[in-house]
């Protein structure tokens, strides 16, 4: 590598910095959802979830051309669905194996559970910690921009390490831009599996009578409510790998067509390999008899939210191919109507080799009030076909190689309506210590999916500049 330096004339050679001052973003969002197709309990059950995500982003100019960005955030959630990895736990987690060996009992002395009632196990809540660092370099003429990034995230059953590089080239007085990027993610499951699968994995075919098994002395019921000993989830095998790797490459092209019009197109290719299913998610087979634990009188109402005292034991966990190829392509078109209104539109077509085809359309209409205020209505529509391996609760066949009842892989369409209000301080006259407030934004949106999933999201962002 060769290095050289050149002195610049104090006036003629002046180079404006890419970023003049340190900037700090404080971001916060709250997400709340409800639904009735929990994947952890086989495509049926309570999907209530809340999530808080505080995030801090710091951008530091290293010199005229280089910027270092640090992004650190938390995502704290409470999930009724994931809590039911152990639906029988009423008193807390087992120290030996997180919350997978339950010892909760109802008043009758028998375990109780339901896909409609959240358990008290450890998996009902968790905090995802994420961090990402980006080093970006701009050429002196600002026509080339390159960057590298490194980051990772960690939660109780999953960890991820990611890295990537990108490059952008501008021409035609910066009216034309071509960008290329690639990224790599190396992930690992710390597998947590449903309680019944955990006991079967530990004790094999004798797990219903082994002295140390949770099911020792517990009444297992058939569909008629009679106590039986025939339950055996022999489709289950341990995870063949705990790794999940993802590789992606992206290309984008942007062109300013006129003082009022700008468009861009982009395409991605994403390759995933490893354990792509979620080991906590149950599957039920229609060609196998059903077995339950709990109140026999509630079996007939199992799929009703009125059921709070009986749980259907799984036949297996979700299984999906160890490879997946995704190829989305999309475009954006923005049009400046006047000094008050801009039209921003977005379309993306998605397909993968699991059989999913999807379409996304989004429209934003930013409306300015004076120099500082902007109000933006947002509408987003999405639809998709079902994955080849999806079937609803208790509809899979045990002879299949792959199966899932995760409704994220089902056929559905969704609508999202939102509104954003932002304020930009041109001279950062409002200050906190040495930081001036440059921008404030609030967003809220309502999301509705045709399978009954509903969500509400509210978020805020505060951008500060160090004087």
Image (cartoon, rainbow, N blue to C red):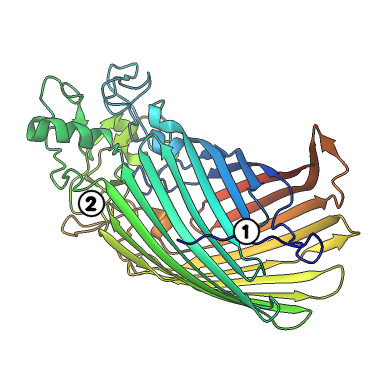
- Badge 2 marks a residue whose secondary structure is loop
Q: CA distance from mark 2 to mark 1?
A: 34 Å
Is the residue marked by circle 2 packed among few (<14), some (14-19), or many (20+) residues within 10 Å? many
Residue sitting nearer the eye, 21 or 293: 21
- Badge 1 marks a residue whose secondary structure is strand
Q: Which residue is mark 1?
A: 416
Could you tell me residue 396's position as x and y percent?
25, 56
Of callouts 2 and 1, the N-terminal one: 2
Side of 459 relative to 47 (left or right): right
Tell us which disc is closer to us: 2 or 1. 1
Side of 358 relative to 110 (left or right): right
Could you tell me residue 270's position as x and y percent?
39, 65
- Give the position of the N terminus as an image quadrant: bottom left
Q: Which mark is residue 96?
A: none
Q: At 39% from the left edge and 32% from the top edge, which residue is drawn?
A: 123
Residue 409 versus residue 458 in the image, above or below: below
Residue 254 versus residue 44 in the image, above or below: below
Q: Which residue is mark 2?
A: 285
Residue sitting nearer the eye, 365 or 263: 263
Farthest residue, direction right: 370
Could you tell me residue 362's position as x and y percent?
63, 67
Residue sitting nearer the eye, 409 or 340: 340
């Amino acid at each position: 590598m060769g290095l050289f330096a050149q002195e610049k004339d104090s006036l003629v050679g002046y180079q404006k910095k890419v970023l003049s001052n340190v900037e700090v973003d404080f971001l916060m969002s709250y997400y709340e959802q409800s639904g009735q197709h929990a994947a952890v309990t086989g495509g049926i059950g309570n999907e209530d979830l809340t999530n808080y995500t505080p995030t801090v982003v710091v951008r530091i100019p290293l010199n005229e051309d280089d910027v270092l960005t640090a992004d650190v955030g938390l995502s704290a959630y409470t999930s009724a669905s994931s809590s039911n990895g152990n639906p029988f736990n009423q008193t807390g987690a087992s120290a030996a194996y997180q919350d997978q060996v339950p010892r909760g009992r109802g008043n009758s002395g028998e375990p109780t559970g339901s896909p409609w009632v959240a358990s008290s196990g450890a998996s009902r809540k968790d905090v995802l910690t994420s961090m990402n660092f980006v080093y970006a370099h701009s050429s002196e003429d600002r026509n080339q921009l390159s960057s590298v990034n490194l980051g990772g995230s960690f939660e109780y059953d999953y960890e991820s390490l990611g890295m990537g590089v990108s490059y952008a080239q501008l021409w035609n007085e910066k009216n034309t831009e071509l960008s290329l990027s690639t990224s790599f993610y190396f992930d690992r499951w710390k597998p947590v599996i449903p309680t019944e699968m955990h006991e079967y994995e530990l004790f094999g075919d004798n797990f219903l009578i082994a002295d140390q098994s949770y099911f020792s002395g517990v009444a297992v019921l058939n569909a008629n409510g009679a106590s039986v000993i025939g339950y055996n989830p022999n489709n289950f095998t341990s995870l063949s790998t705990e790794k999940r790797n993802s590789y992606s490459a992206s290309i984008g092209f942007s062109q300013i067509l006129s003082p009022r019009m700008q468009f861009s197109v982009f395409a991605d290719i994403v390759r995933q390999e490893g354990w792509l299913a979620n080991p906590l998610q149950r599957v039920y087979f229609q060609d196998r008899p059903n077995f339950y634990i709990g109140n026999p009188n509630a079996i007939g109402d199992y799929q009703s939210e009125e059921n709070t005292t009986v749980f259907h034991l799984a036949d297996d966990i979700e299984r999906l191919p160890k490879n997946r190829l995704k190829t989305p392509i999309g475009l954006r078109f923005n049009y400046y109507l006047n000094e008050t209104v801009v039209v921003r539109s977005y379309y993306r077509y998605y397909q993968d080799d699991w059989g999913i085809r999807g379409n996304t359309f989004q429209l934003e209409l930013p409306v300015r009030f004076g120099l500082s205020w902007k109000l933006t209505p947002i509408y987003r529509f999405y639809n998709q076909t079902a994955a080849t391996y999806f079937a609803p609760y208790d509809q899979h066949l045990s002879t299949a190689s792959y199966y899932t009842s995760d409704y994220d892989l089902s056929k559905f369409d969704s609508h999202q309506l939102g509104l954003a209000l932002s304020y930009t301080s041109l001279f950062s006259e409002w200050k906190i210590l040495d930081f001036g407030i440059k921008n404030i934004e609030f967003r809220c949106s309502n999301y509705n999916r045709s399978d009954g999933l509903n969500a509400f999201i509210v978020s805020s962002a505060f951008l500060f500049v160090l004087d």
